[in-house]
Image (cartoon, grey):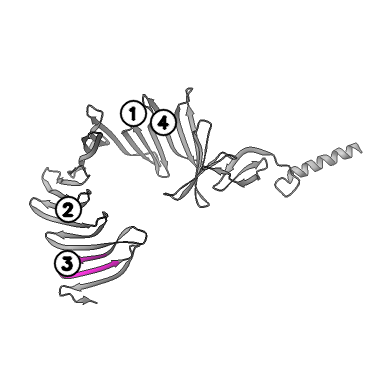
Amino acid sequence: MKKVKVILSIIVLVLTLVGCGEESSHAHESLGEYFADTKNHWVLCSCGEKINHEEHSLEEEYCGVCEFYISYDEFSEVTYVEKYDENLNLISQDIYDDETKLEENTFEYIIDEGGNILNEKCYNFGEIKYEYEYKYNEEGIYSSIITEYTEDGKTITTYNEEYDKTLEKVYDKDGNLIQDDRYEYICDDEGRTIEEKVYSFDVLVNVTKYTTIEFEDGYETYSSYVAEYYENDGSLETYYNEYGSLVREVRTKEDGSVEYDYIYEYIYNDNGDIVNYKKLSGNEIIEEYIYNIDENGITVSYQIYRLGKLVEEATISVGEDGWPYISEVIEYTEETKKVTTYNESGEIVSEETYDKDGNLIV
């Protein structure tokens, strides 16, 4: 009888293990690690079944049960489900659009004895997404090399201690180098960049100069000059004021002759808004824009003149959502006037064309 009882016990045990996951008396064995989505968390049984499935218990976006952070980004309208290690390094990040998982990111780190991160890799659904190589200076950590991977290839970007880009190489999916850019910088005595040069495959393609405006409580630097050099096609030089507005544009042909040299003039109101803009070639006004701005700083209409003739005017309205939109555009030619109205979505509501005598053209 004892032998029979032992055999029956073994049979029951085998049946229990085989029936794991089914509605039975199976005692689940938790693997311990929590998994989570935007609403719930769970652990896995050794059989693969989800167990201890329950809603998050959130306090300031943190669930103390599963130790995941759940946060919603209103700007991108996605939800992040994130987990960190004991050193607050991000180790997993899932991104959801409603219930759809858009990304499943996991992170790997190489850390030195002092706890400094030397290398970081991110994988999305198991495929490498990017790799950061870090260096340290007196001010702390900075990314010295960033490698980004796409289905079309990879981009490797190198930075200096000021986090200025120094090299950028792009490879296609077959490993061929298709872009090779090198960056050089000239700085003033304060360490501020005053000139930047870009070389593509060791050929100069861009020069940018920066101007600094000093204030009592600081300074502001802006791009005041940009030169672009084209292979066998001359160059384009552009000049800017402190508002970032284009003030001069010079196009030079390959033989050194000037194709055009335009000057741009602006009138600003007390709020710094452009109310008048002119494009000139010599003393001739090629183009002029007039903006009508209300006391709230909203442009309510504008007119465009070319060579002294009105060619377009528009009315701008404010929609129910509080955002301005172009509600009517009138376009003029020597023979016709075309009037087009729009709704808040930018869709055409009506379109009418008149001849020079004001008669509607059907």
Instruction: Identify whether 207 is placed above or below 352.
Output: above
Q: What secondary structure is found at the residue carrying circle 3? A: loop
| Amino acid type of the residue tagged 2 in the rendering | Tyr
Q: Earlier in the sequence, mark 4 or mark 3?
A: 4
Q: Is residue 222 left or right of residue 7?
A: left
Q: Residue at x 76, y 44 (%)?
A: 16
Extreme-left residue of the structure = 283
Query: Gap between marks 1 and 3, in whole Å?
Result: 57 Å
Q: Earlier in the sequence, mark 2 or mark 3?
A: 2
Query: Gap between marks 2 and 1, in whole Å?
Result: 41 Å
Q: Which residues are magenta?
A: 328-341
In this rendering, which labeled residue sits more in front, label 2 or label 3? 2
Q: Mark 2 highlights which residue? A: 277
| Amino acid type of the residue tagged 3 in the rendering | Thr
The 10 Å Cα crowd at callout 3, few under 14, some 14 to 19, many 20 or more, is few
Look at the image and say whether residue 91 sits in the magenta stretch. no
Check contact, mark 2 vs mark 4: CB within 8 A.
Answer: no
| Amino acid type of the residue tagged 1 in the rendering | Glu
Image disc number at residue 133: 4
Q: Quadrant of residue 226?
A: top left
The 10 Å Cα crowd at callout 4, few under 14, some 14 to 19, many 20 or more, is some
Image disc number at residue 333: 3
As rendered, which of 74 and 151 lies closer to the eye? 74
